[in-house]
């Protein structure tokens, strides 16, 4: 697998049983990403048992086996490549920490494949995942209308599902021009790596072509530096070493930086990446660095490092648009769950629910509603109970999303509209 190709994180989303794992298995198989020795071993086993068409079946068995053993990774973190890109499959929604991981950047997906079974159409999790993909800033969506074999490859069924999904995308204001629809069978392999004779009415791209033609994510190097701190270490001979991933901009030795909300700063002395000193770090780089005059207790996880002359914003309050995914009852003014934004976890009070938003038009459906519940979208004003560095999503999208967690669950996801600094 070539690591020289540009890398993309790909999310595979969709309702349970619509075929996400099968599709991942198919992609790994068709791109030759299953190690030869694994296939060989299975070939022998299959021949002994007298089974045909075995290789793909065995990829699937392996995934299924992992699942039975309760291994949570199953389809996440699998890798494959096309001519243009090297893809990593990130956690799927449904995995326990998916939303949190997306937001904290651990598994921020660039693009997504939405799997919709042709015999079922848009289902509850299809809606939820599309909401999330939109809220969390997925650029392009490839929609695989799957299980076409079950509906006899009928064009009319395909068209019905496409129109249902288009309605859903419009509801969440996802530009349908940024979505591409493909009739597939993950199980039979139609329109995945090769054009299928079963869908001669379809002349668009097949799945691997569409993946290959996705736009390369532009690393946000031109933006101001934002580097959320994950941990702070003391290393003998060097001193205090904050570590984290550069989200936007560049970190250079000699830069004057500021940590917010701790409100301390200094000059960057050294930057280390993969145990080597480097003069500069760019978006996506995980680094440890050392700043003149900063002690271990001066900064902490959840701080954001940025340029001293344009420090990260600190919110006294902020406004946000949120989507309530699952809440056992209703959310009212005064609700104080934990907000997860980049590496920070801070209790925040929803001070006021300013408007309920109609998802189909994006317009205000009700001013100052008494409550909101699962499925609702709303504009809210939020007051962090401790200082929190966060940015408007329109200015720095990487630092403008958050998840709201309570009772061990992700209750809602949102994007920051504006930040009111003290
Ligand atoms: P997931 O829950 O979305 O990951 O769905 P799975 O990949 O586990 O698939 C659920 C079921 O649908 C399994 O029994 C698969 O064999 C079956 N399946 C998946 N894709 C196809 C397909 O293209 N055609 C048919 N006939 N069955 C499929």
Image (cartoon, grey):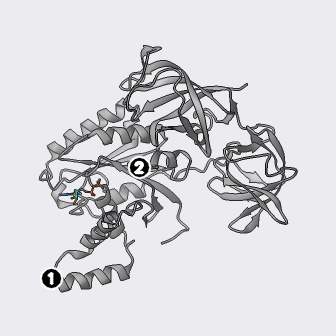
Return the x and y of residue 325 as percentages of the image width and height: 40, 35
343 displayed left or right of 256: left
Determine crowd level at label 2: few under 14, some 14-19, many 20+ residues with C-alpha closer than 10 A. Answer: many
Residue at horizontal 50%, vertical 34%? 414
Q: Are marks 1 and 2 in contact (CB under 8 Å)?
A: no
Name the residue that disc number 1 marks. 50
Residue 85 visible at all: no
Q: Quadrant of the C terminus?
A: top right
Residue 12 disc label: none
User: Residue 183 versus residue 343: which sits nearer the camera?
Assistant: 343
Q: What residue do we see at 29% from left, 65% from top?
A: 64
Task: Identify the residue shown where x is 31% and y is 42%.
Answer: 126
Q: Can residue 318 be seen at all in this image of the molecule?
A: yes
Secondary structure of residue under mark 2 = strand
- Which callout, 1 or 2, points at the residue further toward the start of the chain? 1
Foreground mark, 1 or 2, reads: 1
User: Quick check: 3 left or right of 143?
Assistant: right
Residue occupied by mark 2: 112
* Image coords of residue 375 (percent x, y): 36, 30
């Amino acid at each position: 697998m070539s690591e020289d190709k540009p890398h993309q994180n790909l999310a595979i989303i969709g309702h349970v049983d619509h075929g996400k794992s099968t599709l991942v298995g198919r992609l790994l198989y068709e791109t030759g990403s299953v190690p030869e020795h694994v296939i060989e071993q299975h070939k022998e086993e299959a021949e002994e048992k007298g089974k045909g068409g075995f290789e793909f079946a065995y990829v699937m068995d392996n995934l299924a086996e992992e699942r039975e053993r309760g291994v949570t990774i199953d389809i996440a973190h699998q890798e494959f490549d096309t001519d243009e890109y090297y893809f990593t499959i990130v956690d799927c929604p449904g995995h326990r920490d998916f939303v949190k991981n997306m937001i904290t950047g651990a598994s921020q997906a660039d693009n997504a494949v939405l799997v919709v079974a042709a015999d079922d159409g848009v289902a509850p999790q299809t809606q939820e995942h599309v909401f999330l993909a939109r809220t969390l800033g997925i650029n392009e969506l490839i929609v695989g209308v799957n299980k076409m074999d079950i509906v006899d490859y009928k064009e009319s069924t395909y068209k019905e599902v496409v129109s249902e999904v288009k309605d859903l995308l419009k509801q969440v204001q996802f530009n349908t021009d940024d979505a591409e629809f493909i009739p597939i069978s993950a199980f039979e392999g139609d329109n995945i790596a090769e054009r299928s004779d079963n869908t001669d009415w379809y002349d668009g791209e097949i799945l691997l072509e569409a993946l290959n033609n996705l736009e390369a994510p532009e690393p946000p190097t031109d933006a101001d530096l934002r580097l959320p701190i994950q941990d702070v270490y003391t290393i003998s001979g060097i001193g205090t070493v904050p570590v984290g991933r550069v989200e936007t901009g560049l970190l250079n030795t000699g830069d004057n930086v500021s940590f917010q909300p701790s409100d301390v700063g200094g000059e960057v002395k050294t930057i280390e990446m993969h145990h080597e000193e480097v003069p500069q770090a760019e978006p996506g780089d995980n680094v440890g660095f050392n700043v003149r005059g900063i002690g271990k207790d001066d900064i902490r996880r959840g701080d954001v490092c940025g340029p001293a002359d344009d420090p990260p914003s600190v919110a006294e309050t902020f406004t946000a648009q949120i989507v309530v995914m699952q809440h056992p009852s209703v959310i009212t003014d005064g609700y104080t769950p934990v907000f997860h934004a980049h590496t920070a976890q801070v209790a925040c009070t929803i001070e006021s629910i300013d408007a309920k938003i109609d998802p189909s038009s994006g317009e205000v459906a009700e001013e100052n509603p008494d409550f909101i519940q699962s499925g609702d979208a709303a504009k809210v004003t939020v007051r962090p109970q401790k200082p929190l560095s966060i940015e408007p999503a329109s200015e720095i999208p990487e630092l403008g999303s958050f998840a709201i967690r309570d009772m061990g669950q992700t209750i809602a996801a949102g994007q920051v509209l504006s930040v009111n600094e003290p």
